Amino acid sequence: VRATPYLIEGLGHLSTVLVDDATGSAAVVDPRRDVDVYLDAARDAAVRITHIVETHLHNDYVSGGRELAALTGATHVIGAGAELAYEHRALRDGETFDVGGLRFTVLDTPGHTPEHVSYAVADTSRAEEPALLFTGGSLLVGAVGRTDLLGADHARAYAADQHRSLHDVLLRHEDSVAVHPTHGAGSLCAAGIAPTPWSTIGYERRNNDYLRHRDAEAFVTALLAGQPAVPSYFARMRPLNQAGATLLGGRVPEPRPLRVDEVDAAVRRDALVVDLRTPAAHAAGHIPGSLSIPAGSSFGTWLGWTVPHDRPLVLVLDDPAAWDDAVRQLLRIGHEPVLGYLRGGLRAWADAGQAVEPGASLTVAQLERTLGGSQVERPLVIDVRQPSEYDAGHVPGSVHIGAGDLPNRLAELPHDRPLVTICASGYRSSVAASLLRQAGFRDVSWVADGVPAWEACGGPIERGGATREDEREATPTGAAHAH
Amino acid sequence: VRATPYLIEGLGHLSTVLVDDATGSAAVVDPRRDVDVYLDAARDAAVRITHIVETHLHNDYVSGGRELAALTGATHVIGAGAELAYEHRALRDGETFDVGGLRFTVLDTPGHTPEHVSYAVADTSRAEEPALLFTGGSLLVGAVGRTDLLGADHARAYAADQHRSLHDVLLRHEDSVAVHPTHGAGSLCAAGIAPTPWSTIGYERRNNDYLRHRDAEAFVTALLAGQPAVPSYFARMRPLNQAGATLLGGRVPEPRPLRVDEVDAAVRRDALVVDLRTPAAHAAGHIPGSLSIPAGSSFGTWLGWTVPHDRPLVLVLDDPAAWDDAVRQLLRIGHEPVLGYLRGGLRAWADAGQAVEPGASLTVAQLERTLGGSQVERPLVIDVRQPSEYDAGHVPGSVHIGAGDLPNRLAELPHDRPLVTICASGYRSSVAASLLRQAGFRDVSWVADGVPAWEACGGPIERGGATREDEREATPTGAAHAH
Amino acid sequence: VRATPYLIEGLGHLSTVLVDDATGSAAVVDPRRDVDVYLDAARDAAVRITHIVETHLHNDYVSGGRELAALTGATHVIGAGAELAYEHRALRDGETFDVGGLRFTVLDTPGHTPEHVSYAVADTSRAEEPALLFTGGSLLVGAVGRTDLLGADHARAYAADQHRSLHDVLLRHEDSVAVHPTHGAGSLCAAGIAPTPWSTIGYERRNNDYLRHRDAEAFVTALLAGQPAVPSYFARMRPLNQAGATLLGGRVPEPRPLRVDEVDAAVRRDALVVDLRTPAAHAAGHIPGSLSIPAGSSFGTWLGWTVPHDRPLVLVLDDPAAWDDAVRQLLRIGHEPVLGYLRGGLRAWADAGQAVEPGASLTVAQLERTLGGSQVERPLVIDVRQPSEYDAGHVPGSVHIGAGDLPNRLAELPHDRPLVTICASGYRSSVAASLLRQAGFRDVSWVADGVPAWEACGGPIERGGATREDEREATPTGAAHAH
Amino acid sequence: VRATPYLIEGLGHLSTVLVDDATGSAAVVDPRRDVDVYLDAARDAAVRITHIVETHLHNDYVSGGRELAALTGATHVIGAGAELAYEHRALRDGETFDVGGLRFTVLDTPGHTPEHVSYAVADTSRAEEPALLFTGGSLLVGAVGRTDLLGADHARAYAADQHRSLHDVLLRHEDSVAVHPTHGAGSLCAAGIAPTPWSTIGYERRNNDYLRHRDAEAFVTALLAGQPAVPSYFARMRPLNQAGATLLGGRVPEPRPLRVDEVDAAVRRDALVVDLRTPAAHAAGHIPGSLSIPAGSSFGTWLGWTVPHDRPLVLVLDDPAAWDDAVRQLLRIGHEPVLGYLRGGLRAWADAGQAVEPGASLTVAQLERTLGGSQVERPLVIDVRQPSEYDAGHVPGSVHIGAGDLPNRLAELPHDRPLVTICASGYRSSVAASLLRQAGFRDVSWVADGVPAWEACGGPIERGGATREDEREATPTGAAHAH
């Protein structure tokens, strides 16, 4: 048996291809939507994917289960509570199925979601005891799946379920059993996940802080505290996964280069220009009204946070080769209308005489000088990181508004002072600055390399003061946390 | 302007991607059915395929024009006589269209087919005069497209058309104009094509034998003589290309490994096992009733000759990696029902206790000994090459029946003598031997390395005696000629 | 921390790339000689290989440690007993070193070899306790490294060491600790390794039969019994790894196509022609004097068994693309003089009038008929598998001589009877048949699909009778066991 | 025969792989230094590279001829005047050699360099007449190789040679003969090369302006006028190619990620930090003292212009994947000491508390406002393009100093006014701005999208006034012209 994890960095999503070479059979657990990676793996190993195995209805991405089943003819299995609207096999606690010589046993483990199941897998060629567990969003490496994604109403009850699932089901296994979760480092489905794709029951039993709470009440409190806020696209995922996403035929849509006049016409209709170039490039000059969401592993998450999923997009890329990754990220969050990308990039736009709007960025040295200036020109510094990051240290005098929360709190901001956004790098602050500019604020800049550079260069630091429960609910974060 | 030819070896098919970098536009001329190669090329060059350009309704492969148009949104152009049943732009002689700075002018050049057109292309950034010609099946490198593929009735009239198309249209161009044809070496659409993907008008004017016949009558006679016979699948291509092939979504179907019991069941229903392993492997042992069509560039052609296009297939492969090429070749000839391949190959079959049937091959030394043996055991040697190859030299006493013609001439063959097939390698003779075995002949073998090895080792050679006009019509050949 | 195992199938060799993403550091444990796979992995992950970690002086392959150190500047670490002749860092029991946040601790674990060490690795970002063990040739998945490779003299003493290493060092770890060995399924360094690249201490503690012997004496006996015999090239590996292999500059030598006359001249000098085509192809006809060692994962092992390492080779390939894998396998066993491959394959040879020699293969049905024939023609069936395979069931009347042992036992074989070799497929029997033919036996054939097919088709089976201790020592086996 | 051109974009370098499939032979004409592309091509086509063919001693890049000969054993041929210091075959006018069925005839065609030869190639399988010409730096597509690269002293005499080579040697060929030059669009070895890799004699005869000068004197004048200036590294290429470049073993050096402290230490010694990020990123903040040379096809050319070839470099990359292309470009211009790249990029630098220096860029709208401001703050606009570009239209009041000429003309520039550099994009102006900052100018910015955007947005344009012959000699340009 060979278990190969496939990580999507920004989403912190871990799917697994489990191969039984002796029989040439394979299962794919919790597949991503762009399934070519699994087809290639099966092809290379000359095995047949016989089962697609889902642990739960995902909240953070569009499942590729239906797509993969259509392309391979594999059986799509999921816990009975999921009630998929398309072809599948619904399984109940204790039921088993075989992938070649590998025996899967279904374990009800509600908590992260109510229909959540885990799977214990025995390699029957060696022993009847389970060799590994697929734990989905229950037991993670260094963490535990959160239970508040389906709303605050159920969060405590689900957390109690999670506690039972952990202690009464999963931790009953031997220390030696391997643990393969679906949510890895970077995922918004839990706080504090370690950057290791798999672990063992024993190692987690001893080293996972969440498992130390034998008392359910304390566990619930700990689990509900400190969770990152989630992008708005999350709300669409569960129903979409239940209904089944559009089939793609196994292909990422081809790149479509657009001429300047085509982009111009699309924008005049209803398209949004999304600028995937670096924050600095956007600051140096961009298409007026364009949104800065730089390429990188958080691109999809931030787009899913800030743009309605049916808004047609035109992309501005540093390099046409960036198309593939960008469109994959959009597919994974279910954003499908992408008209194309601006051929020749911003230079083609400028050379055609179209307006280019400057943004502005500051180094920490420049920020320091500005803050020392006269009252009139002194900017309002907006820290757009997570509350917990702000609490841990921020520029004195800066206010805290999470980047994703900005659209809801524009009324609080002054139009007669320069605004400066700051984060931990320049990613979230660039997104925030472009949101502010879209909202009509004129004098907006962001700080390159953000608070860490400020601190490293000896700037004064103030601590605490941001985290209020109400705020936490509304603050975007997460995948972009690393930036 | 960059013209990049893409060759399919067995079919001798040349398509061209023509790129105008200045405007980021590209045209694809006479695309193959599996179009990923063009999508990849456009992606790498960051250009948009704006036009799909067809010179004629192809007789030898399924066009990828419709597929490529669906995936890219490009305009599909073809001569007005083609009357496609799906979306396209029909063009008349003298009409022009632009691919960026490249101006295409349509030239009626009937002959190879009645609706055939060529395209003269000017690079307007340099000059108004044409820089290159797409000549499809009219002027080829070292040859000229045959005119008898739509039946003997029209062959002479079409040949006269071809003569006019060459001399009154194409050869009117400057010596310097590049010539990019669609049929290259290996194609059955002409005899004697040189293995160079493109040429120039002047070089062909001086060195292409067919162009020396200024007299139409002599040209017609020369063109109709010596053409290779064609596989039976050719007859389906023209109507299929007119109606439009099934869309594939840009993906070659995934490999489907089948268990021994699944293969067994499929065969009991209606599937044919096609053995793509080497002739020697088939001779050493094979699934009873399986047809030997070894992998390689002629695979599709031979399968299209010998198997009805709606017969479900199970493939036996040396290596699962052979799936991709085999299925592409099948798609190109329009053979779509492929159930999968036997996982584990023949050894899995044998280990499961299924019957394995031996074939037999002889070295030329063994053949020599056998022929010197007693009258009783002396085999009938059947030379399955082209008549022209047989005429040029064969084993004394061997009779000539082209491999593809065998099914029609079984009644001529004795059941009480060993049969030995021979060709120029072991490819066609292995196919022929497996056809004979399928037809109930018991003692059949084939000669490894064939007549060239026989001759090289000093075996006696007899010349002449095979070519009769009636026979020519019925003899398969062509792509497999090289073997 | 991410641990990615890299398997070489035929050798059953597992190396591991261990990455600490937080610091961008990586270690490679027990690298293969063709190191491009590690360079590519480091490049893709944008990490620096800072350490090359060896568990012992390998007996079964040429280490890539020196090569990788030269190309990356990484530190090459190994147990102090190894005494490498080139630059390295020698480590003693209990010493530690860090690869980013990963702490390696050296554990003396002699047994498989006297200088053997294991490494316990803690992910200090989570805990001080070890998360995983690199166990090299000590504790394997489902097995234990053998101790008789350095000669029978030390085998028992080393086995006692191994027992102590297992129980006093490795099994002292928690059940949850992951176990990453260097020898995997297919390796000749142990018997009975499971086809799973890694396991855990607890799972092995309960399910690994070798660990049940708490009594040292019983363990020693069990470990020394039933080990496969080893190819002769093994003897060269330890000194070669100690001295350091030739540097390759990170590149597999380019394929060198040779003309027929060049091959002919090379053979007249001193080159050996090795035929990598299928057994069936070799049987149908081959270059006289050529050795049949079909391509596949056992190619290198069999060549290392049957050919002196300084004999210049010319390869005959089914496909030029087979060059790369063949030459990698040769590099891994330290066979460097490869002149090139025959361009155009056997057909070019035959067409040039060079002699082609036939071999012969039989289906099990043909074998059955032959065995039922008259005494005169009745062949001697030689079963060339492992003694244990022969014992488990063979064709009645067949004698047992392992394929690799054949050269030493030619005197036992009759020249006046047909010889038929048989194995479990057609791989070892084809190698054996070509060895016999090289040795002057005229009438030699081998049985396609071997004993399993014989049994599956209802042939009678006799059991027992082969295993004698003296014989065991001399019988080749191993990687080829699977065939 | 198949001729496949390989283009290096920035250098405008065209090498050709010429394959004769019938014999499996190939020649590589004027190979680049990183030769893996040719090895891969030969491997894929299963042919042997038998000849490496050089037309002249190159001035613009390091030849890969020696490297390729070492890796393949091919014969390295070049005109007798080249006098290579390493193994080769020197050929005289009229001598011939065969690559399979392709006959090469040497033609002395001095002019671009004194030892320059061309090669006429006949495909003897079709005709004795040449089918194509390799014209190196003599006849190009739409242009003719310049003759002033070896110094002004010989330029006129060499130009007269070139005229004779064109009219008395090359144009004597038939119109139909294909022309494959070594210098393509983007090359500094000529002005006005068309972006088409190959042409024909007839097309060039009619459409190449340089060929219209039947009068030698007029040709010489036309050829010497309007040539772009050349980077300083050119001077090293001819002697280096004569002496032979260091062998690389076929591998581009591995990426070496460096920690912040390692970069810091290297800079304190003698290393130069080269920032390959976008101009905007450099403007937003960069390592003090670093040089901005953005990645892209002109990177090597600009580095070869501005940095001594033995200066150790540390690269700052947007993405570690940019390493490969950057190092290839450095190898091609013979810049070998590259220490590594800054792991984690500028953010790691900033987070470690190292100083980050801002640059500044302006949009054309910002430039307009600044120019309209008070005299005191009004910047000096420096147009760093080619003289010919400046003449064709520039911002009123801007002065002309080519980017590469800046280091020699610093004394002319004021320290008490802001300096603004402008080019046609932001590439050359960013390089120039970073050179000025290195030289101690404090207030330096550059204009995003440059003069084309200025003009497109309605800014006033002034024409003429820059081109003076003395200036032309010293102005960098060329590959970067397109930016």
Image (cartoon, coloured by chain):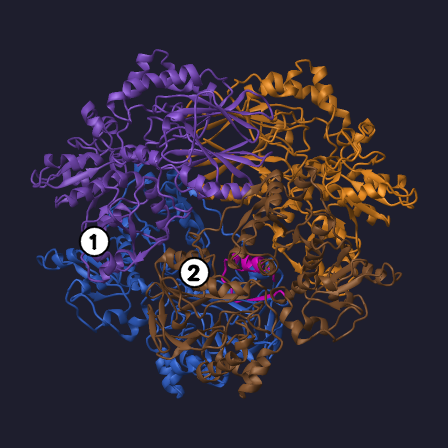
Chain colours: A orange, B blue, C purple, D brown
Q: Quadrant of residue D74?
A: bottom left
Residue D276 is covered by the magenta coloring: no
Q: Amino acid at mark 2?
A: Gly
Asked if D464 appears above or below D421 in the picture, the reply is below
Nearest the eye: C128 or A460: A460
Asked if C100 appears above or below B344 in the picture, the reply is above
Please state the horizontal and vertical placement of residue B163, each as a whole percent of the image. Answer: 44, 83
Nearest the eye: A269 or C210: C210
Please state the horizontal and vertical placement of residue D185, each as a whole percent of the image. Answer: 57, 69
A377 horizontally vs C367: left or right = right
The answer to whether any part of residue A46 appears in the image is no
Please state the horizontal and vertical placement of residue A163, each as a whole percent of the image. Answer: 66, 19
- Image quarter hosting the N terminus of chain C: top right
- Chain bearing mark 1: C
Asked if A104 appears above or below A450 in the picture, the reply is above
Q: Quadrant of residue C308?
A: top left
Residue range corresponding to the magenta coloring: B24-47
Which residue position is annotated with label 2?
A: D244
User: Disc 1 to disc 2, how far (Cα)?
Assistant: 36 Å
Residue at (42% x, 82% y) in the render = B205
A285 horizontally vs D370: left or right = left
> How many other residues sit within 10 Å of disc 2, few (<14), some (14-19) or many (≥20)?
some
Residue at (36% x, 16% y) in the render = C163
Please state the horizontal and vertical placement of residue C141, each as a whole percent of the image. Answer: 41, 25
Which residue position is annotated with label 1?
A: C267
